[in-house]
Image (spheres, rainbow, N blue to C red):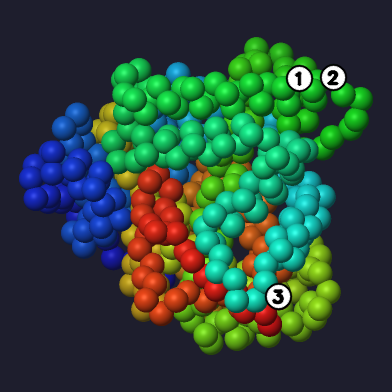
Amino acid sequence: MLLTSTPMVSATAQRPQAGHLRAMRQDMIGYLEGLSQQGDFLKIPLGLGTAYYLNHPDDIREVLVTQAELFHKPSTIKYAASGLFGENLFTTDGRLWKVLRQTMQPAFQSQQIRDHAQIMIDETAKMVSQWHSGQMIEICQAMMDLTMGITSQAFFGVDLRDRPEAKNIVRFIELFNQRISGIPVPAWVPLPATREMKTQIAQAAQLFDALINERRHTSRIYTDILAMLVAAQASDTTGLITDQQVRNEVMNLFAAGYEVTANSLAFALHLIDQYPTVETRLRAEIDQILGNRAITFEDLTNMPYLECVLKESMRLMPVTAVFARQATQTVTWADRTIPKNAAVLISPWTLHRRSDIYPDSLTFDPDRFDISGRSQMPKFAYLPFSGGTRICIGQAFAMTQMRINLATILQRYRLSTTPDYVMQPYFSFNTRPQDGLPMQLQTI
């Protein structure tokens, strides 16, 4: 597919400088959609510097792949995280990032995911067994609870829902997401929310320290991510995988592993409800493959439409609406120039809605992701898990879990919103339904 590219222009705002910052804070989704209408390579004047908005796959490829070594995670993200849970795979760059990525990658390979599939199956079956026809469920909360249980058991061998400290983690994530939405605030700024975050993270750290120490002294053999981190530290010759670093990674993986997945599931269930023809076809596939029995890991290869539905949901409603990089030096390609220290904004939300890539882009159409549809899709036009060398390490785990979750739920129930419900996406670092997602259950 040949795409046209627009020349660089300066993004307009209601007011110079402060207007952009205020718009980001007030309505990030609306702000991004406004940028997309002005072009696909925009210069954004900000109060403390300049940012560039990229919305063309070719430009995005330059940042994420071709010249990825020249683009790091923004310093603002690191400042916001410092003093809270430190550097981790999400925030760091360079040698430490490479060591951490190599250390954790084996935990997310196919065999390890297969080993954890039974946890996904059992926990989802347990959840739906507690539901009943006619019941109203707040789906966002239900999916948060489900994914927290699965993530903590698969990553750390324990169900953290049973621990009171889990509330500290949930509250910390909520506050941290607010902190780094729009323009992040450094951790040293003495805001009330900062003090609360430090209290919450200190209490959560006690829980994770106990898990790490217990794992170091057990004779039982584990193959989860915590085991790999502990083993990597024991054999580390770089001096980079310290006690603090292990804890940082454990907390980061837990936070990243359940919230994004939960919100993605909520959006998928809502879209399935809104498109009856999609729901009918999906249920037919589930019924044909599973009948009345429980799903298995092996079944997933025989359920292509389920995968298409999930991928299309993440296209239309990507939980990661925007992410950023920062140029470590002046970078050029074609007729583009990004100055040193400038931030680069890449928005899956607007990229996924380009009508020249996705015709009728606001329509939920899973067939975009069948074999024929994928063959016409430009590379780096679909980024629900980011892309390039820093693509989400848990992508395969999340895709496996969400397909198992959806198939098990839809095998038992039809979920529907009330006629007056209106979905309003809300951005707080991650995107979620603003007012939750109440849905009524009906037994199949």
Amino acid type indicated by mark 3: Arg
Does the residue at mark 2 contact the one at mark 1 (Cβ under 8 Å)? yes
Q: Is mark 1 on a helix, strand or loop?
A: helix
Neighbour tally class for label 1: few under 14, some 14-19, many 20 plus, Cα within 10 Å: few
Q: Which amino acid, by three-letter code, is at mark 2?
A: His
**Could you classify mark 2 by the number of other residues whose Cα lies within 10 Å: few (under 14), some (14-19), or many (20 or more)?**
few
Rounded to the nearest angstrom, the CA distance separating label 3 from label 1 is 41 Å
Q: In the picture shown, does residue 103 fall above or below 397? A: above
- The CA distance from mark 2 to mark 1 is 7 Å
Which residue does the numbered mark 3 point to in the structure image?
A: 412
Check disc 1 and give the amino acid type. Answer: Asn
Q: Which residue is drawn at 38% across and 67% down?
A: 423
Q: Quadrant of residue 341?
A: top left
Residue drawn 31% across and 28% down?
185
Label 1 sits on residue: 213
Residue 196 position (above or below residue 113):
above
Q: Which residue is drawn at 82% across and 37% down?
A: 223
Expressed as whole percent of the image width and height from the top left, the position of residue 215 reads 80, 25
Q: Residue 217 has which mark?
A: 2
Label 2: which secondary element: loop
| Residue 293, x across and y down, in percent | 83, 74
Which of the two discs, 3 and 1, labels the residue nearer the N terminus?
1
